[in-house]
Amino acid sequence: MKTHKIAVIAGDGIGKEVMPEGLRALEAASKRFGIGLEFETFEWASCDYYAQHGKMMPDDWKAQLAGCEAIFFGAVGWPDIVPDHVSLWGSLLKFRREFDQYVNLRPVRLMPGVPCPLAGKKPGDIDFYVVRENTEGEYSAVGGRMFEGTDRELVLQEAIFTRHGTDRILKYAFELAQRRPKKHLTAATKSNGIAISMPYWDERVAAMGESYPEVRWDKYHVDILAARFVLSPERFDVVVASNLFGDILSDLGPACAGTIGIAPSANLNPERSFPSLFEPVHGSAPDIYGKNIANPIAMIWSGAMMLEFLGYTEAHDAVMAAVEHCLVNGPRTPDMGGSANTTEVGVAISERIAAAE
Ligand code: NAD
Ligand code: IPM
Ligand code: MN
């Protein structure tokens, strides 16, 4: 049996509560389908580690992750101890960049059993992907401050759009659209206001579109695109966006489809030169941490995406069937109107995965 080495990093806050349930589901799937998963847990990439060591990760973090095919990741951030830009640039954003995980793939799907905040929508009406550029764009540490503390204070923050970085995310998104029945792609832009990078982005979208004649594509400024997510989500199939716009749209999408507590993501290095990273879209949720009431489904669904990435489609489907069964029949955590806790939901899903159908 082939063994896949997986790094497990729970991080902070509810990352530590949902991770055991993600692992429970993966273990149930690996047992049922005979998949060799070898987990190695790392306590670093957390604000607790920072409090003890003055940094988010040890200097040899890359060496410690050598041989891992994937990273199963909870959430990072505890702003009372470490400023968010320090904790995130010292961990998650470092992984995305140094491991060249340039695709952030975020499904947006109205699942059966999930109450939808948008009137009249049923499962099937909302089913699309946000493909978010994940290594450059508006997320940059290039810039600086001048004249600090004076009334001439000046802050400059650059955004970076390379041809290589722009074309590769667009190519991924067009390829994905081409494989889907609707073959439709929407590009998020803002070329009316952001006068240099976004017209460039639009140009590259149009150029890439020429290579995919079967894909119908359109583009919207991100402000009206956000409104359309709410007003007519059924018209989307694949939505490709720069780093910041993709970040915002990938919280808005899942909120339109019920709760961000179930939204998963895959940070992919499609060439597999480096490990890919699978994590919930949500963060460490300090407001609910410690009560064991976080919804573990985003973590579990991220695990399903990891199984699919490793080549185990059947195991992915079994995890998703168990998730759907739980969404329809319960138990449910409070974000979905239930009163079950994190563990109860995780155990129910794992038992369902374990039961051969
Ligand atoms: P958040 O996603 O942590 O929380 C937003 C809201 O959603 C909160 O009310 C929270 O209780 C709720 N929520 C989130 N996940 C839930 C779940 N599984 N079940 C039920 N409710 C859930 O976003 P935030 O408050 O902006 O950020 C908190 C911290 O997390 C910050 O430090 C932030 O930087 C960090 N963060 C990390 C990641 C990540 O590691 N990928 C992602 C987003 C935010
Ligand atoms: C996400 C998060 C991160 C991001 C933060 C925590 C840096 O919001 O994964 O969506 O903005 O990418
Ligand atoms: Mn986000």
Image (cartoon, grey):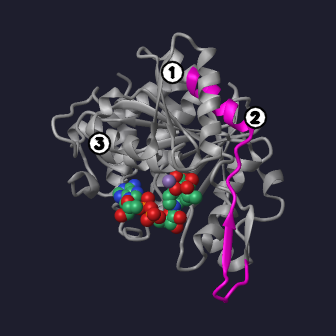
Q: CA distance from mark 1 to mark 2?
A: 20 Å
Q: Amino acid at mark 3?
A: Val
Q: Position of residue 337 (x, y in %)?
A: 20, 54
Residue contact between numbered discs 1 and 2, judged by CB atoms under 8 Å:
no
- Label ID, residue 230: 3
**Mark 2 — residue?**
164
Q: Amino acid at mark 1?
A: Ala
Identify the magenta region.
146-174
Residue furthest to the top in view is 214
**Mark 1 — residue?**
177
Q: Position of residue 8 (x, y in %)?
A: 62, 51
Residue furthest to the bottom in view is 150
Ligand 2, by image quadrant, is bottom right
- Label ID, residue 114: none
Residue drawn where x is 33% and y is 61% of the image? 293
Q: Say which label, 3 or 2, has the lower sequence index.
A: 2
